[in-house]
Amino acid sequence: MDRMSCEIFIGGKVTKEQLPELIKAINDEGVEDEYGNGNLRIESPERLLQYVEDGFIKFIHVEKGNGEFVDLESWLQENGIPFNRTTEQKDEYDAEDVTWLPGMDSPLVLYTDAMGNENIPGKIVRQALQALINYNTAGGAADRDQYLNLALNLLKGVCPELLQIPKFEIVD
């Protein structure tokens, strides 16, 4: 298992009853602050709030297995708490931008380069381009619609809607 740097942003509504469980999940996972100070121990909700940055709870880890907060991410999904995780590119591994929101079956994973630009398969883009070329040369309306729909579906498959997690808030 390769070790990679990653960061996680936790947002959404967390009930006061969930706070102790969230703190335990964070402590069990093992996180670092933005300076790489490892094995932080969050002892109280007040201490947790010290790690809210721009409306999100933010932690990093400079050497996490596969660049994932495996147990913490699972706990967040099981408890309906949205998150976004980014993992840096390393060796043969692309960087990842992973987002999960309540109601999703699984997280949306976008592969990116080291600068955060999405990697989109050229093969699919070329197929969509060919469908648009065919659209322009097709004779009948039915053929034109078929090519246009093919191009749209191909592009939607590699360019999913970008998701934003809501800001963190504690609710009763």
Image: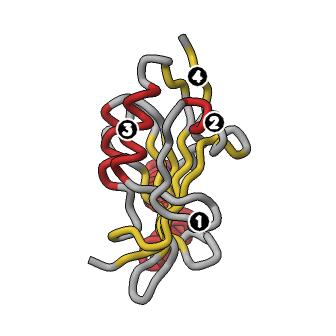
* Mark 3 lies on residue: 24
* Mark 2 lies on residue: 49
Visible in this render: residue 48? yes
Residue 102 as seen in the image, left or right of residue 78 = right
Mark earlier in primary sequence (3, 4): 3
Q: CA distance from mark 3 to mark 1?
A: 58 Å
Q: Which residue occupies the foreground of this view, 36 or 169?
A: 36
Residue found 52% across the figure and 49% down from its top: 84
Q: Which mark is residue 136?
A: 1
Q: Which mark is residue 170?
A: 4
Neighbour tally class for label 3: few under 14, some 14-19, many 20 plus, Cα within 10 Å:
some
- Which quadrant, please, contains the C terminus? top right
Give residue 142's position: percent from left, percent from top: 44, 49
Q: Secondary structure at mark 3?
A: helix
- Which quadrant, please, contains the N terminus? bottom left
Neighbour tally class for label 1: few under 14, some 14-19, many 20 plus, Cα within 10 Å:
few
